[in-house]
Image (cartoon, rainbow, N blue to C red):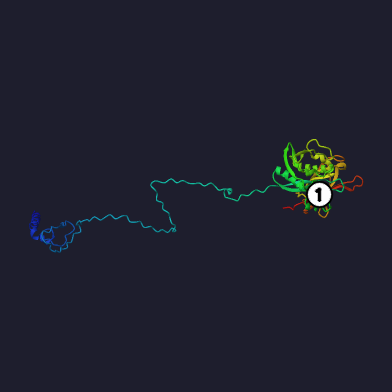
Amino acid sequence: MRRRLGLTGLVVLVVACGNAVGDAGNVAVLTGPPGASSSPPAATGSPVVTSTRRPLTSAPTTFQATPVTVPATATPTVTPVPTPSPPTPTPRRTTAPATPVATRTPSPTPTPTTRITRPPVSPSASPTPVSTPEPELVEISAYFLLDEGGGDGGTLMPVRRIVSGGTRQVVAAALDELLAGPTEAEIAMDPADQPPFSLIPSNTLSLGISGPTDGIVTVDLSREFEAGAGSSVFVRRLAQVVYTLTQFRTISGVDLKLDGQPKTAFDASGKAIDGPAKREHYLDLLPSIFVDQPAWGATVTRPIVVSGKANVFEAVFQIELSDDQGRVIIRRPVAATCGSGCWGDWRHEFDVEAVVTERLWITVWSPSAVDGRPENLRRYPITLPPRP
């Protein structure tokens, strides 16, 4: 009780003496039991240290406060510390390879992405120079004449030509090749001095071809076609035109016009033809053994197929394949479907797998009924390309 009164009295004394001591500044007051040491008390039951500051009522006087040792259990005054901003994270080094990693920051609202698919580009889509395709080449025959020394004006013989174009263009081209006549190379090809020739005047013009209609074509030629021709020559000119145009399967006959006017055709005997002229009207202008395929001077393939018509004794004749020096490679007998006064068809195939000669000759002939000597002989040059 005494201790509590002592403490109260001390506080009253400090307040009462405030005016006397106030100018001295701060006063540190230690509370404790009488006679207590100024050294810090033990941690348990330690008194509280109180610090006060009075306002100055007079001119300030410099005063140096005495340091006070605060017990360990005293509660220090806490000064608020501003909250620091979050530190920038430092990238952590790892042992993985230093490969840059792209970090994508997601957008709050994803933007829809439109994927454009490009169609594949074809080779034709790239700009290329426009070129006109080359026309197809076709091997045809122009029918000329071959004089075998009989003095009868010659007999028909197909000669190979190369033309281009579609069906209608090929027919017109075949007629043009016929009107042009044999070439110098063709004339010089036969060493036996039996070159092909034509009886059609070289100044004859083709004025047009129409059809075929029901297998018949109409040919319009200039008037020069009949100039200076007797009946024998004129029918051979007709035969050349008819055979040249009827080699195509779509054509079976020919109507003739000269300068746009219809012209009556005649057969091999000179008799007027009632209707279109056809191949059968000129059989008598064929050689006794007629080779229609391959044409004279043609390029052939393996095996070599030879065909035509024949009108020989007992319908039998010989066919040979020889080289350019006249050496016989193959000789075979051939039988036609008719003979001894009638025309028969025939066909033969040569196996030439072992033949390496390119320039060859096809020779046909029939043995004489009297002594067996060759007669009705005809020779055709051909070319056999080497194997690829």
Count of marks, rendered view: 1
Would you name the residue on which mark 1 appears? Answer: 196
Q: Is residue 282 left or right of residue 117?
A: right
Q: Nearer the viewer, residue 279 or 107?
A: 279
Q: Nearer the viewer, residue 262 or 46?
A: 262
Name the residue located 74 percent from the left edge and 44 percent from the top edge: 206
- Residue 9 coordinates in the image, percent (x, y): 8, 56
- Residue 163 coordinates in the image, percent (x, y): 72, 47
Q: Quadrant of residue 49?
A: bottom left
Q: Residues within 10 Å of mark 1 (few under 14, many from 20)?
A: many
- Residue 14 coordinates in the image, percent (x, y): 9, 57
Name the residue located 72 percent from the left edge and 39 percent from the top edge: 210
Q: Is residue 296 left or right of residue 41?
A: right
Helix, strand or loop at label 1? It is strand
Indicate whether 218 appears above or below 78: above
Q: Nearer the viewer, residue 341 or 256?
A: 256
